[in-house]
């Protein structure tokens, strides 16, 4: 729910004023007879308050017709009645102070002075409210079907014992019989095949599959079909889409800038794979919440599917940042609540849930489980990547060894050998090992300006840099020019290179720095440079001296520039180094190995990024008054809503463990909602409507199930079968219920002599026929491509483009003619949030803003224009016609028409249809018929 | 609208076809297609049901409306109230002084000194309303306008704030005001889209299609983007001759009619057949309404559509003429955008750095055409039942940004206005403080503004709901009070 900001205006300080006024009013001596609640106060409350604060409405969460609620108070203030203290009781203040912003009642004359003093007296006398005088009782919000565990029901007995094929059918039939209805006739075999194929794979059956099925006389031919379809990769591509709707997956960040989210797709692929491999649902849940601990990194994309403001879009002021963070966390909690548990939690961000027993504290306690989740990319640590990583870290270690070995060949300082000229990038001074506790680097001249060193490194005989501040080394200097976060003395030994992390002297041409090591060490090498990143060449020390001191404190010079080629001299051929043949050979070998290692390391692939949440130290979470981050109340710890028990974690629980506990709790077979909600989603996928038709709300605001016992039976069956999705698909699609014809019986009398099902259950919620519905956008597009023979079956990876750009500000131009990569299934389209596909978006494609538990099914002229006239349809029709024409020998008109019907509708045309189509094809071409087939109702509806 | 359905109190029934089908079951299969399509074919049933096969049929509001149509002039990028409608002489006095106790940092960064209004103001009309010289044509209409100077937004960021203005929520994914309106009331014209969004000639606004999206309402109720320059997509099939197109259409009708016979009583099938007929009519009526050839010279001149020196202005003027033509044709909701996307204020009203320079350009485009639209609606009598809304997502700060000559985002007090049907003309409601920074009297979050617009359409914003993911969603979330002081 949107953050509420405007309530600031209701938060004015009415207290002082009210206080004065009440002071005057309440100071009068109290009369003797105590006020009688039932006779004097209850009627007063009824008259002035109940219109907004009783059974029908509870504005601001305040209810005054029930004792416990009246004393508890509303959202704005805690207790509304303080017995004995009228002056400080909000209830009295609101009605007594005519100038209060929250003057109550807001309209009308308000309470008379007599009524006010009566109310005040009653409060001051102790606010006696006898038990048993309330005229309403508080419904127990816990007493709700979905909060109780499912109970194993026995499949009911039915009058008709022949029709049921499965327990499912007995539940359906019993309900039909109860309503005086009969099940419809079974659909013909082709209809069932077409239905189940579209339903499970989102594509129509190929003509060969139809042919094969019609020839298959085995008793379990249908079962073979279902097994084949469930084993097909097309199944996951179809059913993943249902899931992605619910979690509002998209490939852009949303909001105004709507930038591309280029690494979101691995989550989409994860979902497809999870369906295809029939990942047990409890595992599917765990992986999406804490997959980083379960070798399923991409799965946690679930946590961050929502729109989010990028840092640049958030205001620079702190309240804007806090609000943006709250919005981002809210999306995670809401998604978890509605997706897995069918609970709408969002309203508890601002106030206790109006219908369900979820308090504001519950809501923020849930936030605390995910308070360390950031909307950001992280590295994808697949086993392959980890193996590569390990290999490259071995290579790096060997490279470091070689570097150390190469030092043997570096000429020693002050040894009579000419050493290379100083360069701005990096210089090495090597000397015989010496014990040192201090080292001083003194600069005596520069090429320009004040000297600058980006890093000073000192290596001991083990090859470790002991100069680092992190090793405990302290640094002092002759003086420093400071430019914050650029040139500071601390950057001299911080382990980071480059001008932006460097030290600069405050004297032109000179300066010194001194290192004090944490302990005495054997050292043998110093590395230093102006800018190892190679951008800066000024401020370079051209004359220097390195001195060390041991514990005796006596300084010895170990290196200077005097034995180097003079700075600025014309380079000449280096003097031949003084090496024997063996040394020369070893050096060559080492250099060769080094080059090889460097090449291998350079080829190590860059890490693949995942938009799947970045995990960090969790934020501290507070209950926020009316959801406002600027009005924090008490801190909360991770805890499940009290409705479900006492599970809570200490405030120092590590980030990942929080999510693990949350996931385990949700994915438990004991959770009354989790399995039920999912079973219902599966049922909805098959029949268009769930047994509960509010698929993401199983709370008090949702609808009760049409078949509560069947829902429980299926839930327990699902758990029994190890949370297997495919098991559910199979028993449902093979049931007699699912096999019914979609067309209603031709006349009421055929259904039942007494009852016309159209009159009592027109949309077939009781399933006296199969409820047909329009195919969804993806199924239409994919089927057109499948029928035209153009569908590309390549799976996974970054999405193809529906627009001229992959994200960004508005003004997206749709792709009209697709390259081959754009002829993949629509689930692989790069999903730009808020931009619906130019042709199919009008067919109720979700826009990725809010989660969609069920596709709306609207019918508009824009759909007709898009499907009848678009380039996409015309191109598919042309390809479809070409596919038929290209057979050998070329078909005559009637054969071509028959082939088109077979491909598009899985049947032969009737003689009538053939006669009608023939002249159209002869005059206007086969593509015209194909265009019509793509638009006809028989193609567009679930058979 | 003789037999129109009454809109549901809790209008969740869009998908509940029970009522429709039980009525239709007795012989829909036998009903000839033509009668199905006729506007008179309604069920005459008092139960609140939106007929899924005819989502745009007119529906009665909750109570007698003051307005039947709405034209929204949406100025994207956040127009400065201080350079337009909210006269603050104190700012002249305080020019270039620091604001004592003012914020150090606002949306885009450090705050600079207070800055005087960048245009001079003068009194206008009989009410003597002070209006800036930036917009002389619109300024001439103040006697007919009801100003609200004390609006607040829930966000200081363009995207969420445009969401908030257009949908009542800062988050993505909620239905727009126009979608709610169309869902509630349908349309008087079945041959044109019920809800049209006319993008600015320079591009679409910052928040794009969210401003006219259906959110979770059925896609039928989304705005159709359409301008004088860019027609509706897919109006005709490219490269297909009219004869071939007609042959395809006829064959499709036959196939569908046969299929319907085999599935009697299925309203969805009938609805889809009807949608192709509607599409065919739209193919004729959309080009007619977008073709401005028939507009006389003096009208083009009045709007500034003849301005050859300023093509953006001329194009916006043509959009304004189109808006009037759509209203004339009974299109329920027209949204006219002025200003494109984020562009450092180059293409919209987001004047962060060079406010005056940029506003000179934007006002030139907006002023004459928009004023002409209102005058033209008035002279044709259309303003009697058309509400015109001028709005922007938030306002701007009284001080310049540090080192710049522009103002930062300010959601705490800004101006929008209403004119036309049902409003109290010449009223200025609510105030900001003396520097124009924060609303201080009659403070109205945009919820109230939207509630007021629905009210003028005869809709109770608390009653107009749609069930989604367990919520009875409303345009105004759980907020909103009608601003009665601006109602006539």
Image (cartoon, helix red, strand yellow):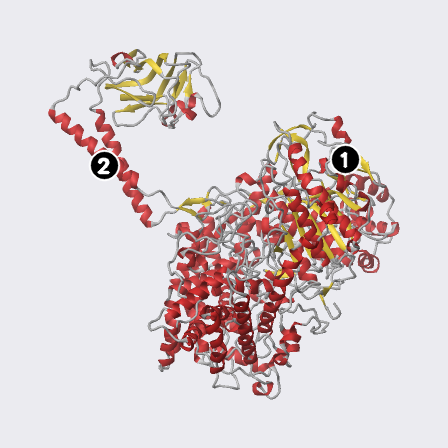
What is the number of callouts on the image? 2
Using the rendered view, name the quadrant where residue A500 is placed.
top left
Name the subunit of mark 2. A
Q: At 58% from the left edge and 39% from the top edge, which residue is drawn? A: B343
Left or right, A889 with respect to B285, comes to left
- Residue B452 drawn above or below residue A573: below
Mark 1, secondary structure of its residue:
loop
**Residue bearing mark 1:** B87
Q: Which residue is mark 2?
A: A596
Q: Position of residue B285 (x, y in %)?
A: 65, 62
On the question of residue A354 being in view, the answer is no
Q: Please indicate whether residue A28 sits to the left or right of residue B294 in the image.
A: right
**Front-most of residues A174 and A608:** A608
Q: Is residue B86 above or below residue A780?
A: above
Of residues B267 and A710, the one drawn nearer to the viewer in this rendering:
B267
Q: Secondary structure at mark 2?
A: helix
In x, y percent, where is residue B12?
65, 64
């Amino acid at each position: 729910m949107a953050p509420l900001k405007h309530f600031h205006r209701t938060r004015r300080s009415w207290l002082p004023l009210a206080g004065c006024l009440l002071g005057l009013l309440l100071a009068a001596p109290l009369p003797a007879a105590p006020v009688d609640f039932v006779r004097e106060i209850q009627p007063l409350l009824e008259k002035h308050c109940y219109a907004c604060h009783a059974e029908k409405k509870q504005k601001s969460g305040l209810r005054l017709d029930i004792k416990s609620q009246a004393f508890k108070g509303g959202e704005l203030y805690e207790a509304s009645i303080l017995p004995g203290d009228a002056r400080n009781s909000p209830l009295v203040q609101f009605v007594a102070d005519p100038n209060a912003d929250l003057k109550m009642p807001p309209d009308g004359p308000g309470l008379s002075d007599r009524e006010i003093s009566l109310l005040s007296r009653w409060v001051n006398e102790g606010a006696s409210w006898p038990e048993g005088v309330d005229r309403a009782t508080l419904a127990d919000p816990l007493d709700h079907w979905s909060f109780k565990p499912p109970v194993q029901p026995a499949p009911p007995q039915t009058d008709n014992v022949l029709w049921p094929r499965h327990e499912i059918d007995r539940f359906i039939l019993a309900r039909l019989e109860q309503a005086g209805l009969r099940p419809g006739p079974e659909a013909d075999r082709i209809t069932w095949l077409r239905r189940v194929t579209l339903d499970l794979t989102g594509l129509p059956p190929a003509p060969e599959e139809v042919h094969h099925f019609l020839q298959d006389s085995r008793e379990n031919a249908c079962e073979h079909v279902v097994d084949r379809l469930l084993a097909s990769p097309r199944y996951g591509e179809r059913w993943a889409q249902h899931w992605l709707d619910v979690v509002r997956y998209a490939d852009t960040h949303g909001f105004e800038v709507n930038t591309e989210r280029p690494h979101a797709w691995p989550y989409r692929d994860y979902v497809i794979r999870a369906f295809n491999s029939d990942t047990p649902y409890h595992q599917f849940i765990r992986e999406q919440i804490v997959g980083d601990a379960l070798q399923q990194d991409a799965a946690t994309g679930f946590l961050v599917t929502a729109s989010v403001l990028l840092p640049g879009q958030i205001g620079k002021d702190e309240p804007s940042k806090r609000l943006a963070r709250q919005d981002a966390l809210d999306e995670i909690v809401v998604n978890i609540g509605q997706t897995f548990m069918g609970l709408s939690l969002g309203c508890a961000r601002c106030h206790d849930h109006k219908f369900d027993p979820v308090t504001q504290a519950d809501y923020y306690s849930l936030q605390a489980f995910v308070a360390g989740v950031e909307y950001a990319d992280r590295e994808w640590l697949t086993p392959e990547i980890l193996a590569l990583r390990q290999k490259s870290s071995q290579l790096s270690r060997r490279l470091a060894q070689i570097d150390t070995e190469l030092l043997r060949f570096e000429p020693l300082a002050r040894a009579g050998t000419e050493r290379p000229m100083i360069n701005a990038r990096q210089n090495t001074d090597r000397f015989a090992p010496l014990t040192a506790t201090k080292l001083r680097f003194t600069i005596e001249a520069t090429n320009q300006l004040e000297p600058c060193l980006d890093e000073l490194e000192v290596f001991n005989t083990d090859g470790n840099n002991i100069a680092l501040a992190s090793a405990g080394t302290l640094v002092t200097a002759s003086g420093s020019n400071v430019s914050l976060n650029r040139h500071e003395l601390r950057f001299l030994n911080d382990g980071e290179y480059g001008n932006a992390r460097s030290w600069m002297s405050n004297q032109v041409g000179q300066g010194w720095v001194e290192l004090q090591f944490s302990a005495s060490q054997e050292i043998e090498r110093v590395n230093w440079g102006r800018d190892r990143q190679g951008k800066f060449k000024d401020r370079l020390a051209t004359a220097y001296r390195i001195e060390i001191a041991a514990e005796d404190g006596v300084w010895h010079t170990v290196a200077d520039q005097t034995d180097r080629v003079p700075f600025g001299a014309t380079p000449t051929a280096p003097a031949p180094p003084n090496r024997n043949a063996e040394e020369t050979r070893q050096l060559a070998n080492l250099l060769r190995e080094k080059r090889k290692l460097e090449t291998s390391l350079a080829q190590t692939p860059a890490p693949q990024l995942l938009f799947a949440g970045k995990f960090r130290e969790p934020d501290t979470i507070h209950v926020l008054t009316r959801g406002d981050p600027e009005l924090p109340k008490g801190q909360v710890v991770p805890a499940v809503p009290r409705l479900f028990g006492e599970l809570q974690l200490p405030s120092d629980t590590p980030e990942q463990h929080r999510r693990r506990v949350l996931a385990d709790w949700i994915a438990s077979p004991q959770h009354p909602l989790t399995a039920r909600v999912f079973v219902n989603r599966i049922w909805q996928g098959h029949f268009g409507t769930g047994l509960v038709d509010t698929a993401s709300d199983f709370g008090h605001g949702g609808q009760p199930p049409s078949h509560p016992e069947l829902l429980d039976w299926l839930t327990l069956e699902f758990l029994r079968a190890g949370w297997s999705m495919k098991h559910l698909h199979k028993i449902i699609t093979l049931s007699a219920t699912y096999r019914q014809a979609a067309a209603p019986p031709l006349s009421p009398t055929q259904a039942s002599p007494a009852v016309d099902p159209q009159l009592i259950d027109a949309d077939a919620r009781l399933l006296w026929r199969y409820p047909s519905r329009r195919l969804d956008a993806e199924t239409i597009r994919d089927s057109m491509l499948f029928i035209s023979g153009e569908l590309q079956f390549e799976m996974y990876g970054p999405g193809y483009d529906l627009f001229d750009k992959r994200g960004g500000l508005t003004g997206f131009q749709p792709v009209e003619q697709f390259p081959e990569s754009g002829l993949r299934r629509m689930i692989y389209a790069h999903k730009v949030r808020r931009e619906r596909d130019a042709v199919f978006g009008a067919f109720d494609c979700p826009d990725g803003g809010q989660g969609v538990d069920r596709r709306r099914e609207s019918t508009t002229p824009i759909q007709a224009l898009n499907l009848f006239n678009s380039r996409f349809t015309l191109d598919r029709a042309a390809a479809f016609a070409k596919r038929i024409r290209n057979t050998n020998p070329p078909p005559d008109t009637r054969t071509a028409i028959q082939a088109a019907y077979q491909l598009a509708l899985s049947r032969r045309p009737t003689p009538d249809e053939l006669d009608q189509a023939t002249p159209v094809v002869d005059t206007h071409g086969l593509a015209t018929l194909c265009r019509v087939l793509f638009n006809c109702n028989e193609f567009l509806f679930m058979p | 609208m003789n037999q129109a359905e009454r809109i549901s109190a809790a209008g969740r029934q869009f998908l509940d076809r029970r009522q429709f089908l039980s009525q239709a079951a007795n012989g829909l299969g036998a009903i000839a297609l033509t009668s199905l399509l006729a506007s008179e074919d309604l069920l005459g049933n008092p139960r609140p049901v939106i007929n899924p096969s005819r989502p745009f049929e007119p529906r009665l509001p909750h109570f007698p409306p003051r307005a039947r149509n709405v034209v929204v002039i949406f100025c994207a990028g956040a127009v400065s109230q201080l350079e337009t409608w909210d006269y603050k002489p104190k700012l002249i006095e305080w020019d270039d002084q620091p604001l004592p106790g003012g914020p150090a940092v606002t949306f885009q960064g450090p705050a600079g000194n207070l800055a005087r209004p960048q245009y001079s103001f003068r009194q206008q009309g009989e009410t003597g309303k002070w209006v800036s010289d930036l917009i002389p044509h619109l300024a001439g209409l103040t006697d007919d306008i009801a100003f609200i100077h004390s609006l607040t937004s829930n966000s200081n960021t363009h995207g969420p704030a445009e969401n908030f203005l257009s949908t009542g929520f800062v988050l993505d994914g909620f239905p727009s005001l126009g979608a709610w309106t169309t869902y509630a009331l349908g349309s008087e014209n079945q041959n044109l889209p019920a809800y049209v969004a006319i993008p600015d000639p320079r591009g679409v606004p910052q928040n794009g299609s969210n401003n006219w999206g259906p959110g979770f309402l059925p896609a039928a109720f989304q705005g159709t983007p359409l301008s004088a320059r860019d027609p509706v997509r897919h109006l005709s099939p490219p490269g297909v001759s009219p004869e071939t197109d007609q042959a395809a259409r006829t064959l499709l009708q036959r196939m569908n009619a046969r299929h319907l016979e085999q599935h009697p009583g299925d309203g969805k099938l009938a609805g889809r057949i009807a949608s192709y007929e509607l599409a065919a009519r739209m193919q004729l009526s959309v080009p007619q309404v977008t073709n401005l050839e028939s507009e006389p010279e003096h009208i083009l001149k009045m709007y500034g559509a003849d301005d050859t020196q300023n093509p953006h202005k001329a194009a916006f003027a043509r959009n304004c003429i189109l808006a009037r033509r759509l209203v004339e044709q009974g299109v329920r909701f027209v949204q006219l955008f002025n200003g494109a996307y984020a562009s450092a204020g180059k293409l919209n009203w987001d004047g962060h750095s060079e406010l005056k320079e940029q506003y000179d350009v934007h006002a030139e485009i907006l002023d004459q055409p928009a004023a002409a639209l209102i005058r033209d609606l008035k002279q044709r009598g259309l303003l009697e039942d058309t509400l015109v809304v001028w709005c922007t997502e938030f306002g701007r700060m009284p001080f310049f940004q540090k080192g710049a000559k522009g103002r930062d985002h300010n959601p705490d007090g800004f101006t929008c206005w209403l004119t036309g049907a049902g409003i109290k003309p010449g009223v200025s409601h609510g105030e900001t403080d003396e520097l124009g920074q924060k609303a201080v009297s009659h403070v109205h979050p945009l919820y109230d503004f939207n509630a007021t617009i629905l009210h003028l359409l005869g809709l109770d914003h608390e009653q107009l709901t749609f069930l989604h993911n367990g919520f009875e969603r409303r345009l105004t979330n759980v907020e909103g009070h009608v601003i009665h002081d601006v109602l006539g």
